[in-house]
Amino acid sequence: MAKRKIKFKKPKLPIKQNKIGAVLLILGFGLLFFTLVLRYSYIMLTGHAAGQDLIMKANQKYMVKEQQQAERGKIYDRKGKILAEDVERYKLVAIIDKKASEGSDKPKHVTDKKKTAKKLSTVIDMTPEEIEKRLNNKKAFQVEFGRKGQDLTYKDKQKIEKMHLPGITLYPETERFYPNGKFASHLIGIAQKDPDSGELKGAMGVEKIFNTNLAGKKGALSYIHDIWGYIAPSSKKEKTPQRGDDVHLTIDSNIQVFVEEALNDMVDHYQPKDLFAVVMDAKTGEILAYSQRPTFNPETGEDFGKNWANDLYQNTYEPGSTFKSFGLAAAIQEGKFKPNKKYKARPRKVMGDEISDWNKVGWGDIPMTLGFTYSSNTLMMHLQDLVGADKMKHWYEKFGFGKSTNGMFDSEAEGGIAWDNEAQQKTTSFGQSTTVTPVQMLRAQSSFLNDGKMLKPWYVNSVTNPVSNKTFYKGKKQFAGKPITKNTAKKVRTELDKVVNSKDSHAKNYRDDSYDMEGKTGTAQVADSDNGGYVKGENPYFVSFIGDAPKKNPKVIVYAGMSLAQKNDKEAYEMGVSKAFKPIMKNTLNYLKTDEKSKGKADVKYSKVPSVEGQGVDKAENTINGKSLEPVVIGNGEKVQEQSVKANKQILPNSKVLLLTDGDLTMPDMSGWTKEEVVAFEKMTHTKVTMKGSGFVSKQSVNKGQNIGKNDKIEVTLSSKQISGETKPQPKKSSKDKAKKDDKDKSKEDEKDDASVNKDSNEGNTADETNNSSSEDQQSEEKPSNETDQSNEENTSNSNSTETQSTENGNN
């Protein structure tokens, strides 16, 4: 069968239709291309797409901006010793994730946790177990070690790096360094890191006051890099940080050490609630040292926050009898204080309550000068009556009380003169009800040492920049007013001298054989901020002393105060702050190489204590007597075993020297002994003597000559009753004639001085025409017994007494 061939016909497509399709296709692609070209051209020409700046976006991706912290300025003392500066410290970090070592020939994470923990524990204050516990964190990429892994020194860094521990990294950080630790902490202050910016900022003290100067100005660095990290040409812009300014203080580090050590001893012995001491240059007003308790260590942060306030400027208190000096000055200036004129030192009623002197009964009719020596409250109320209440308030205001000293501390306290009623006015006269700050007391006290002119206390010498060599602040001596005349200031100092150095002194515990000084004690009740009124308790007092030395030409003023001793509180009441004041003053004067004893005082001769240990009793007594000293034999032995005052020590004539013999211990006659002499007896015999009262020994529980043992109970009563209240008769004629002649021959300069002060006060009279006594009238030749009768003799003895109630009523 023949095969059939099938033929396929080719389709006939229209040529024209094919051409149109091709053209449309080409046009479509061409339009798309053209659109893209236009789009890219637009982007290239404008740098913008979808409303975004592409150049900025690219720069943000590859631009680096860094802030560079400026070096914070240093704080120096007056002699250039660094008190605060920046240092580079290190933070310890451990990388514990194994992923950190991927792709690396050497491990980048901690591989042996036990070994690492053991070695790190030799550098940071953590046990191996504590460190290993942190290293065993399964979730973290890296771990830190808290405060104990921070603030590592360069030496610590070197030690850790020598261990060659994988995964251990040290990051540098700038920290503030305080080389002295607890050292004028509330004055220097502290700078802390801002948690957000990492910048050091002053939190208190000079660090805060001068933070703008100390901080300097930050620097800035910016540049653009490519994907390989190379900096693009001409993209780097840098602004160099400007170093902070340095602050130079007036404090002297050596004197500051004396203050810190004295306060530490006071804290150990008394455990007070509050305590402060300040040393000021008596002629310039420069603060040479200041500290307080509680305090803190700015280097470690220990105790930071216990007390934020700087007590020198920001804390007020009722000062007690140290305030009496200013009422005395006002009375002298007004011509109302006549040293030898008698007044009635007896309790008196004020607004229904009785206010008495510290001994409760007073002393009868005694001279005004003796009343001030005794720190009589009733004298000060009497002087206020003579001057007039309104005038007296005006004088307190002239001394600057109730006004800021403009000491640059934020929230500087001004205190207040309490004057709403008679009770407040009268209690203010002896330093209750009215509140002050220590710096106000220094300012007012300085007028007595500068011919009636008050100094403004200051603590910053200069603010300078070592790079620019510019000085931005310069401290200088400034007077803050002239409340009294030169003659009045001199007479006040005469009375302050008697407070410490006269035979009737109750502040003998502040004396020191190595220098002459003058000053005023203070005791005050402490306001109860929680319950109102005053703090209750056995001896709930604020005790203080403000004094200057050397007496002839004062170089420094030392003011110390202690509130609410929690330990040895009775002793605190009786001894005041002498355990701090005396070493501070003595060490400061020795350091300043001051001739403490006036070389011109030809009428005062000192006795050199001979060595009599090992001698027979009779010979030892004769030897002691031969030096114009008073021997007191303790015991019935034949030879002197120990003497209470070391050989070759210079002391005033008629001072007691206790001689302990080698026989049985016997009780001496302690009549008229001072507290310090009783303490010397205790120390020498290792016995315990219970003392009651204040003043001089008037009674003893064990009779003279009776054998005593170390465990025997011995009690003595001290009393001021043996003081007659009358001044010792002295030939006064020559000194009075001299005083009258001095008044008559008063210079024109003094007259001008009087006129200017009284014109300013609008009060009229001066003290010069009424006060004819000279400083010689009450000078005593009696030895200093170095005894503390009662440095705190003042106003408010017991919380249950009527005078305390009066004070509370006045304060409220």
Image (tube, rainbow, N blue to C red):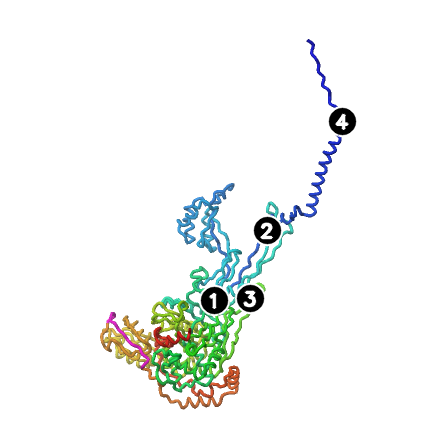
Residue type, label 1: Leu
The disc label shown at residue 64, or none:
2
The Cα atoms of the two marked residues, 3 and 1, are separated by 19 Å
**Residue 600 appears in the picture as rendered:** no
Q: Is residue 565 above or below residue 704?
A: above
Q: Which residues are magenta?
A: 709-721
Between disc 4 and disc 2, the foreground one is 4
Q: Within 10 Å of the Cα at label 4, are there few (<14), some (14-19), or many (20+) other Cα atoms?
A: few
Q: Are marks 2 and 3 in contact (CB under 8 Å)?
A: no
Three-letter code, disc 2: Val
Percent x, y of residue 385: 43, 83
Q: Work out how far the residue at label 4 is from the one at label 3, CA to CA, in angstroms.
A: 99 Å
Hey, what amino acid is under mark 3?
Thr
Magenta segment includes 108: no
Instruction: Provide the residue designation for mark 1.
Output: 187
Secondary structure found at label 4? loop
